[in-house]
Amino acid sequence: MLKVHEGADIATLMNELGARARAAARPLAVATTERKNAALLAMADALEANTPDILEANARDMEAGRAAGLSTALLDRLMLDEKRVAAMAAGIREIARLEDPVGQVIAAWERPNGLFIERVRTPLGVVGVIYESRPNVTADAGALCLKAGNAVILRGGSDSAHSSAAIHACLVEGLVKAGLPEDAIQRVPVTDRAAVGELLKGLDGNLDVIVPRGGRSLVERVQKEARVPVFSHLEGICHLYIDKSARLDMAVSLTVNAKMRRTGICGAAETLLVDRAAADTHLVPVLDALAAAGCEIRGDEGVRVRFPSARPATEEDWRTEYLDAIISVKLVDGVGEAIEHIETWSSHHTEAIVAEDASAVERFFNEIDSAILLHNASTQFADGGEFGMGAEIGIATGKMHARGPVGVEQLTSFKYRVRGTGQVRP
């Protein structure tokens, strides 16, 4: 393990992390599925066995977070309890059950000259993950990268430093028990922001890709400064559209869940769009249910006429990711105007439609360019675990390589294997 000395030069420290990760990546890329799964199962066992230590570390982070004035949403992201630790362990076991992507033949074909060509999945190499608040990302990212044959360098936020360190210790325990290099999952051992800058430089050529998971300022910095490829996830301005054909009971339950189940996650609905043709039947019951759940309503003029307690919505509301018990609401003239609003203001993360009209659903699915689209389901299903991926590193909203939940398969690249019988090119 890397030892940190007081006053250590950050560039030297980080480049050493990179060199160690690169060295670990080579044996990891050819590790058997059985050995990787053994490490994952040992990690899950270690998380459960060390739950008291993890919760004690988290209590220190929570105390510091309250003292620093973190918002309710950020404190919720930071908080661990026995149920959440158990969920981390269950997620790792689910990853162990997934098919190993490394070595999978994606496509194969034979050329007229007899050459046989295969496109085969391979690890990315060394992945850098920069994240804020959520200590569970330590477990998710470490496990996913391992299953995909990648070494990973984790740089969590200072607000979750104690929690992440305790979780990371369990991951290393699993690696050691399975006989895999412990440098396969490393954690940046300092909170100095300069460490992020060194990651963005690529660690002397040893970093292959960066995955940022955090607030807008972090992701914008990564996108602006990174000298290696980035899996982008800017923010989650997610929309829920209630069509005139929607069942009222479903519209109410889905809206409350999409907004209020957990307000601080990127899949929480931030804007509600309601078909004007359903305003007299659907709007007030939906908003009454949201208000009863403790949600602040900000509406356009048509909304406020029918729901006077709503605060006026401004243009700024349409572009805001609240991550809190606040929702902006707008009446629209059918699915066409809903699509227009979403394409204007969305961050292209997740959008949902509540409707029984199949033609409205198909138009919504075909014309909206977001990573995840849902029909008659809560936006809070925008999650790798709910997609059957075991876990995720984040939701990628870009269009290159990975899009949507970044799971095991998305953490691989590919290479071509060409087999011949002595062919030469004329």
Image: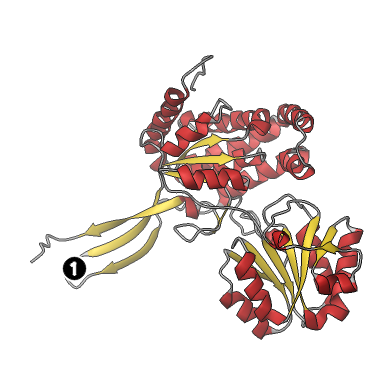
Label 1 sits on what residue type?
Answer: Gly
Secondary structure of residue under mark 1: loop
State the residue position of label 1: 114
Q: Crowdedness of circle 1 by 10 Å Cα count: few (<14), some, many (20+)?
A: few
| Of 258 and 341, the residue lying toward us | 341
Q: Residue at x 71, y 84 (%)?
A: 357
Residue 213 falls left or right of residue 201: right
Nearest to the observer: residue 132 or residue 250: 132
> Where residue 10 sits in the image (x, y, percent)?
47, 24
Please name whichever residue, 277 or 92, is drawn nearer the observer in this view of the structure: 277
Q: Residue at x 69, y 65 (%)?
A: 239
**Residue 82, x across and y down, in percent:** 77, 38
Depth check: give the residue in front, 67 or 146: 67
Q: Is residue 237 above or below residue 369?
A: above
Q: How far from the left and from the top, in percent, is residue 167?
A: 64, 32
Do we see residue 339 in this rendering? yes
Whether 51 is drawn above or below 415: the answer is above
The extreme left residue here reads 426
**Residue projecting furthest to the top:** 6
